[in-house]
Image (cartoon, rainbow, N blue to C red):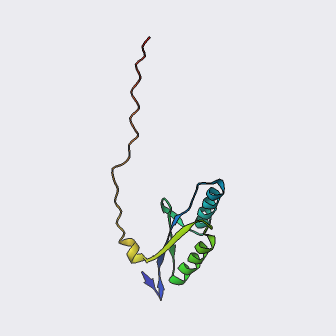
């Protein structure tokens, strides 16, 4: 969608951050909190999305993400237009069911 020269954009932040140490888990949590504070919403595990009013506004949020990347992290940013976002297709597999309880063991006396 475009209004008077503005092109609405979506910013997708996809990340792979280590969580093998207490320090790494803290860095992961801090990064995720910064995304949420900046208006990103969890789309799926390690993929967060934010709607922006323009390409310039998207640039501001991209710079914030870049600044927040932990030393050992990898973050990828993708920007797409409203039109591209609305063309997204979502597929759902079979809903997960709770596992069946294990059978009761026979007790022999």
Which residue: 50% across, 73% down? 77
Q: Is residue 68 above or below residue 105?
A: below
Q: Nearer the viewer, residue 79 or 17?
A: 17
| Extreme residue in the bottom direction | 5
Residue at 65% across / 53% down in the picture? Answer: 22
Please identify the quarter of the rendering in which residue 109 is found.
top left
Establish if 1 lies above or below 76: below
The quadrant in which residue 74 appears is bottom right
Figure disc tally: 0
Question: Is 72 left, or right, of 80 in this rendering?
Answer: right
Q: Is residue 6 above or below residue 44?
A: below
Percent across and percent down for residue 23 are 66, 57
Q: Which residue occupies 57% across, 76% down?
A: 61
Position of residue 66 in the picture relative to residue 1 (left or right)? right
- Nearer-the-camera pick, 20 or 95: 20
In the image, residue 59 lies at what x, y percent? 55, 80
Give residue 52's position: percent from left, percent from top: 52, 76
Q: Quadrant of residue 71?
A: bottom right
Residue at (47, 74) in percent of width and height: 78
Residue placed furthest toward the top = 109
């Amino acid at each position: 969608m475009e209004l008077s020269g503005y092109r609405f954009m979506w910013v997708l932040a996809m990340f792979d951050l280590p969580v093998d140490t207490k320090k790494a888990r803290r860095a992961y949590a801090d990064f995720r909190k910064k995304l949420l504070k900046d208006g990103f919403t969890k789309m799926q595990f390690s993929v967060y999305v934010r709607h922006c009013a323009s390409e310039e506004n998207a640039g501001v949020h991209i710079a914030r993400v870049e600044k927040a990347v932990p030393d050992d992290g990898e973050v990828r940013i993708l920007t797409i237009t409203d039109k591209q976002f609305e063309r997204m297709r979502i597929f759902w597999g079979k809903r997960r069911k709770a596992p069946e309880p294990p059978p009761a063991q026979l007790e022999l006396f």
